[in-house]
Image (cartoon, rainbow, N blue to C red):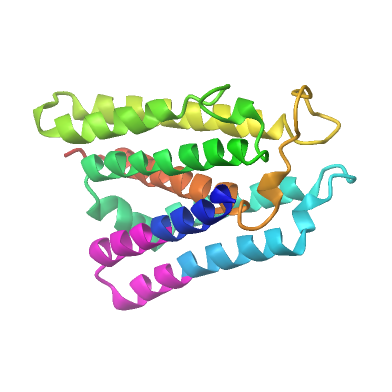
């Protein structure tokens, strides 16, 4: 299926982009190597979770998938607050941090293909409740217009709030489409494809990357870096 190979290719492409970002922003060789190992580890452990079927069990409350999401948030938080996160925040201009969010066109295309393949519910696509394509367009527009913008700090805060809100909309919709006692959207196929490999990389790596970029942006803003 097209969505299967697109998931693998887009995840590896984003991983490569993160590796290049780290390579340019981090001048400490040991920290840089640790970050590269972390990227590989993130791909590996999430792939293992999907391949073994651990998170496909919805008979328990809370389901193992809840712990999976908790782990993702924990990794994002630890990475952002670590020396690596500080270095990335200090060395990466806001224009670049915002522009990189345009990569979210990849999960949008992935979800569309998964819907076409009969895997994803339509509500997770641009034909349903997913409007994250707005983040892609705004990120690209801001990156292009950045040198001419005034009040860049306000623009950065506004974009971050928008991007997090639209990402939360997709995540909440996905969670409420899972076959759990808390399922709200029940009119079509449940959202179980994200618990299998390679689709587990959608939340496990692509959503993870979007959150990480927002978190590093917030750290740069809090540290007072405006460019």
Left or right relative to 168: residue 56: right
Q: Position of residue 86 (x, y in %)?
A: 34, 55
To which quarter of the image does residue 136 belong? Answer: top left
Q: Position of residue 196 (x, y in %)?
A: 69, 54
Q: Quadrant of the C terminus?
A: top left
Residue 225 visible (yes or no): no
Relative to 117, does residue 32 appear above or below in the rendering?
below
Q: Residue at x 75, y 34 (%)?
A: 190
Relative to 33, does residue 198 appear above or below in the rendering?
above
Region in magenta: 15-37
Q: Position of residue 211 (x, y in %)?
A: 47, 43
To which quarter of the image does residue 214 belong? Answer: top left
Left or right relative to 47: residue 158: left
For the image, the number of numbered tags is: 0
Left or right relative to 89: residue 143: left
Q: State the predominant SS element of the stretch in magenta.
A: helix
């Amino acid at each position: 299926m097209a969505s299967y190979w697109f998931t693998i290719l887009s995840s590896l492409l984003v991983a490569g982009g993160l590796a290049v970002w780290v390579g340019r922003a981090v001048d400490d060789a040991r920290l840089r190597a640790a970050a590269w190992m972390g990227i590989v580890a993130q791909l590996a452990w999430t792939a293992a979770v999907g391949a073994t079927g651990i998170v496909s069990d919805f008979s328990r409350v809370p389901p193992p998938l809840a712990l999976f999401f908790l782990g993702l948030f924990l990794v994002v938080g630890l990475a952002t607050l670590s020396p690596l996160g500080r270095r990335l925040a200090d060395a990466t201009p806001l224009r670049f941090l915002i522009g990189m969010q345009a990569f979210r066109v990849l999960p949008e295309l992935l979800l569309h293909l998964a819907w076409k393949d009969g895997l994803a519910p339509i509500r997770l696509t641009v034909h349903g409740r997913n409007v994250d394509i707005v983040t892609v367009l705004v990120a690209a527009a801001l990156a292009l217009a950045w040198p001419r913008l005034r009040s860049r700090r306000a623009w950065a805060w506004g974009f971050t709030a928008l991007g997090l809100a639209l990402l939360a909309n997709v995540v909440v919709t996905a969670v409420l489409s899972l076959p759990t006692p808390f399922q709200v959207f029940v009119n079509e196929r449940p959202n179980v494809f994200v618990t299998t490999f390679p689709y587990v990389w959608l939340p496990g790596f692509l959503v993870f990357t979007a959150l990480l970029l927002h978190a590093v942006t917030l750290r740069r803003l809090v540290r007072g870096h405006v460019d």
